[in-house]
Image (spheres, rainbow, N blue to C red):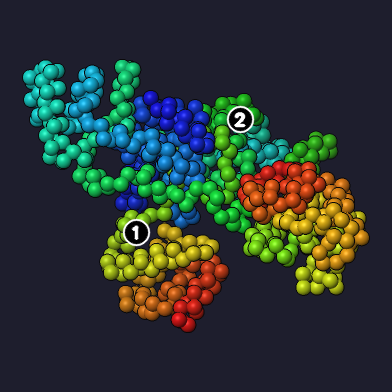
């Protein structure tokens, strides 16, 4: 019945599974939507969509699948299709008041019921000038056994509902919950937390149950053993590109930096310009006076460190390939040499690039760095960070 | 069993639908939304409205899934064995019920709230898949299988700090509590402060929504913040005229209740400064 709708959801990238679809059908079978398209919409959303970022997309798919149905009028349906008796009775219950119903029942014939119902529907239609009385795709017949599902019907009863002319899903109130939302430090931290290595260091503060039992059994009296608590022991070394073309990304990089600072206990950071050469620095204001030799870093930090380069990788190709190609000083060895040295010292490495992934292919230096880094270059988005953390693990 | 508006909790139609679907199909309901929009309160109100007992399980970053089921207190058993206590012969004496077990063993249908599930470790929801799906679990120590007498209504809240695993999501109904519009918010405030004067309410709401629209706020004030603020306004007995003293003065009176972040206050001060110079 709703397979097309379901397939559309899948097609447009909303992660729905058969299991959820079946749950949805079960809800309809239990008549939770009560023949109202709005309730049907809410029900579909609660069962099929599991993240608010998909709400907007869902609204659009829903709208394209089910718009127009409300224009089908009930008489056409009654004329065209042979409806099961129980279903009509149910409809009659909704439409007619008790006395009228009893009156018809006393007449006792199904034809009579049909007739009254039709008449009644016509009347209603006239009185409300059509617009409000519609049949939607909402709901399902509660009579699954008939193998017939007349796409549910909503016959508006409460006047207040009709005031809401704009359908909820067409308002698209969830528009700004869709993806591409700004990534704040909070969400960055979560992405960075993927990178964890539990280790026990420090004070013995936690009860070590297994050891206690073992040693109690051995010594014949209660012998409590403790051990240090688990903590994230991952070690991070970050190199930030500063100045020049990076200025546009300062605020983004700041966020990344502050997120990384609080997510990792062991973190070291240094700055470089455009490409890694023989010297890096910790203080941008004194970058010429207080340079630290990259060689020293390679010897200081062992292979356990995970190495992250952050930069837009936009520079002249000479700055990577040539001796003396650096744009601020004369370098005795090429940038590529230094990058490869760093990569072999810290095999767990990535390059985080704040520029949009789509533009990478237009910058030659970006392509070259991608090649140097074996494609371990990720964009500075949540997905990119996720991917990067996976590469580092 | 049907859940609707209660005396002190205003619901929207989509929320009612989600809750009722979860009750009907006996599946967990996952609630997300901005902080302070009443996610936790929902479970309490469902329990209250339907007259059911509420079991609350508040999750912390250190919470483990099995703690909700049961905990085997090996240490006290060990200690008792030293003291020669008779209790020690029966392992059952050392198995402490967790919140999920308590909800399962309730004779009547109960409401089980798993609050802020995203605070726990990333694997936490996966560890509870089977338990919440089948509503039963095994106690390894005794080999006993505990299954729910009546499947409880499970309400799970999340603040979006971690993405939840797909397998877990598939088993839940999902609802995102939208921030209420002005009309609904007025209703909510009226429920909490029935005696509030209409003009005070209107101007307070206006100011409130203006604040929410200021771009670049780190933490937008939400329902619980405006309730606190109005409470303060009422306690201090501030007249409506004081609320809008000077249109150039950006910081609202008693702003401490609305802006909880130093950077946000600074942002407002900056804006006020810019306005003054105009």
Label 2: how many Cα within 10 Å (few below 14, some 14–19, many 20+): some
Mark positioned earlier in the residue sequence (2 or 1): 2
Residue named by callout 2? B139
Near-viewer residue (A279 or A140): A279
Q: Residue at x 31, y 17 (%)?
A: A146
Q: CA distance from mark 2 to mark 1?
A: 50 Å
- Chain of the residue that carries numbered disc 1 in the rendered image: B
Residue A375 location in percent, x, y? 75, 43
Helix, strand or loop at label 2? It is: strand
Near-viewer residue (B126 or A271): A271
Mark 2 or mark 1: which is in front? 1
Residue named by callout 1? B182
Residue B52 location in percent, x, y? 39, 40
Quadrant of the image occupied by residue B97: top right
Helix, strand or loop at label 1? It is: helix
Horizontal relation, residue B72 to residue A294: left or right: left
Look at the picture and state if A334 lies above or below A361: below
Residue B170 location in percent, x, y? 51, 34
Label 1: how many Cα within 10 Å (few below 14, some 14–19, many 20+): some
Q: Residue at x 20, y 44 (%)?
A: A159
Residue B113 location in percent, x, y? 48, 43
| Residue A246 visible in rendering | yes
């Amino acid at each position: 019945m709703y397979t097309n709708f379901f397939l559309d959801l899948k097609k447009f990238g909303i992660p729905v599974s058969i299991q959820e679809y079946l749950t949805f059908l079960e809800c309809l079978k239990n008549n939770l939507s009560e023949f109202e398209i709005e309730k049907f919409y809410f029900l579909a959303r609660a069962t099929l969509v599991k993240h608010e970022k998909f709400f907007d997309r869902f609204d659009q798919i829903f709208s394209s699948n089910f718009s127009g149905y409300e224009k089908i009028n009930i008489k056409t349906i009654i004329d065209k299709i042979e409806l099961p008796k129980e279903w009509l009775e149910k409809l009659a219950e909704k439409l007619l008041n008790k006395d009228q119903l009893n009156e018809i029942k006393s007449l006792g014939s199904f034809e009579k019921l049909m007739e009254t119902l039709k008449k009644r529907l016509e009347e209603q239609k006239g009185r409300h000038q059509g617009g409000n009385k519609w049949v939607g795709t909402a709901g399902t017949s509660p009579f699954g056994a008939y193998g017939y599902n007349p796409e549910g019907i909503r016959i508006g009863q409460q006047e207040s509902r009709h005031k809401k002319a704009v359908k909820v899903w067409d308002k698209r109130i969830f528009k700004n919950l869709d993806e591409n939302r700004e990534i704040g430090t909070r969400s960055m931290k979560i992405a960075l937390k993927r990178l964890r290595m539990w280790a026990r260091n420090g004070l013995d503060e936690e009860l070590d149950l297994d050891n206690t039992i073992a040693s109690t059994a051995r010594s014949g009296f209660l012998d409590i053993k403790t051990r240090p608590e688990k903590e994230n022991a991952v070690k991070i070394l970050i190199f930030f590109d500063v100045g020049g073309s990076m200025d546009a990304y300062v605020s983004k990089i700041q966020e990344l930096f502050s997120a990384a600072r609080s997510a990792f206990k062991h973190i070291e950071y240094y700055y470089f310009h455009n490409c890694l050469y023989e010297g890096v620095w910790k203080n941008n204001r004194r970058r010429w006076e207080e340079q630290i030799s990259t060689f020293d870093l390679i010897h200081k930090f062992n292979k356990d460190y995970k190495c992250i380069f952050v930069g837009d990788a936009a520079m002249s190709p000479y700055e990577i390939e040539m001796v003396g190609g650096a744009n601020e000083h004369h370098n005795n060895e090429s940038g590529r040499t230094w990058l490869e040295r760093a990569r072999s010292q810290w095999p767990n490495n990535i390059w985080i690039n704040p520029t949009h992934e789509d533009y990478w292919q237009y910058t030659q230096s970006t392509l070259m760095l991608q090649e140097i880094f074996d494609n371990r270059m990720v964009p500075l988005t949540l997905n990119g960070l996720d991917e990067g953390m996976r590469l580092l693990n | 069993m049907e859940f609707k508006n209660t005396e002190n909790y205003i619901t929207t139609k989509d929320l009612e639908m989600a809750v009722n679907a979860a009750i009907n199909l006996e599946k967990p309901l996952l609630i997300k939304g901005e902080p302070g929009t009443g996610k936790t309160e929902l479970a309490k109100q469902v329990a209250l409205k339907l007259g059911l007992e509420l079991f609350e399980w508040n999750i912390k970053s250190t919470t483990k899934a099995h703690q909700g089921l049961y905990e085997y207190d090996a240490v006290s058993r060990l200690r008792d064995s030293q003291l020669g206590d008779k209790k020690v012969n029966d392992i059952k004496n050392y198995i402490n019920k967790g919140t999920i077990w308590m909800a399962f063993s309730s004779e009547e249908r109960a409401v089980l709230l798993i609050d802020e599930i995203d605070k726990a470790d990333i694997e936490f929801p996966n560890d509870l898949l089977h338990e919440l799906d089948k509503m039963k679990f095994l106690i390894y120590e005794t080999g006993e299988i505990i299954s729910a007498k009546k499947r409880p209504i499970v309400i799970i809240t999340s603040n979006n700090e971690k993405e939840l695993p797909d397998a877990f999501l598939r088993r839940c109904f999902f609802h995102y509590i939208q921030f209420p519009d002005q009309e609904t918010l007025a209703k909510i405030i009226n429920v909490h402060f029935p005696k509030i004067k209409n003009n005070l309410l209107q101007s307070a709401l206006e100011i409130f929504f203006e604040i929410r629209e200021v771009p670049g706020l780190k933490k937008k004030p939400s329902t619980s913040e405006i309730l606190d603020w109005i409470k303060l306004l009422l306690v201090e007995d501030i007249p409506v005229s004081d609320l809008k003293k000077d249109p150039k003065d950006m910081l609202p009176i008693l702003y401490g209740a609305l802006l909880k972040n130093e950077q946000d206050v600074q942002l407002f001060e900056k804006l006020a400064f810019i306005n003054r110079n105009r």
